[in-house]
Image (tube, rainbow, N blue to C red):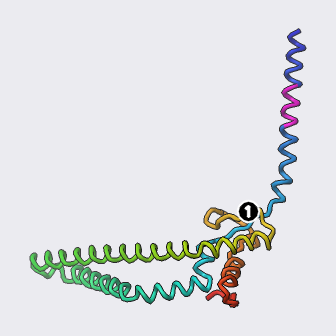
Amino acid sequence: MTNINTGRRSMKRTLTVAAALLMLAASVPVLAQERIGVVNLREAVFSSNAGAEFGDVIQGQLKEEQQAISQLESEAMEMQERLESDGAMMNESEREDLQSRFEKKVQEYQQRRARFQQAVNQRQQQFLQQSRPAVDAAMETLLEEHDLDIVIPAEAVIYAKPDMDLTDKMIELLNEQAGDGDTNNN
């Protein structure tokens, strides 16, 4: 009797494994039929005509601060060069004074640069949020035109065939939605 039960269990296990393999094999063609696209949304938004215009505006608004930061960097580098070239010939108090001024200049440079970068990031984030309705509409059009099932952000993709990258098409759609008519990126 135990041989019969063992045989039945073995047969049942074999049938279960066969059914699982059959279901797995049946699902593979379904996966192969899915249409996938890849889009670098950040690149698309900032490369669109509206994004290029935003870049020009923000660059103009922050130009003076960028110049001030560059000036601080230049002054700090001059102090460092002077410390390296003339430090050995300076008396101790001169060297300490220059070292102290250099450290303060570097600290001021780092703080202003960090605030500047934070301001740029904040404005870019605001622009991305403002662009969201246009991006959503362009994405909807992209999905329909290319009969896509899924669009994956380029940042999440290790490798994709070049024809799967639809970033340029997304830029065109964003430009069309803005009513520019000109689909060339800058």
Q: Does the stretch in magenta take in 14?
A: yes
Q: State the residue at coordinates (10%, 75%).
A: 92
Residues 94 and 51: in front is 51
* Amino acid tagged 1: Ile
Q: Is residue 16 above or below residue 35?
A: above
Quadrant holding the C terminus: bottom right
Q: Indicate the position of residue 19 as horizontal and vertical percent values.
A: 87, 36
To which quarter of the image does residue 118 belong? bottom left
Label 1: which residue?
150
Q: Residue at x 64, y 66 (%)?
A: 153
Q: Quadrant of residue 129?
A: bottom right
**Front one among 144 and 93:** 144
Query: How many numbered marks are there?
Result: 1
The image position of residue 107, as x and y in percent, is 27, 73
Q: Secondary structure at mark 1?
A: strand
- Residue 170 or 26: which is nearer the viewer? 170
Res. 106 image quadrant = bottom left
Quadrant that contains the N terminus: top right
The residue range painted magenta reads 12-19
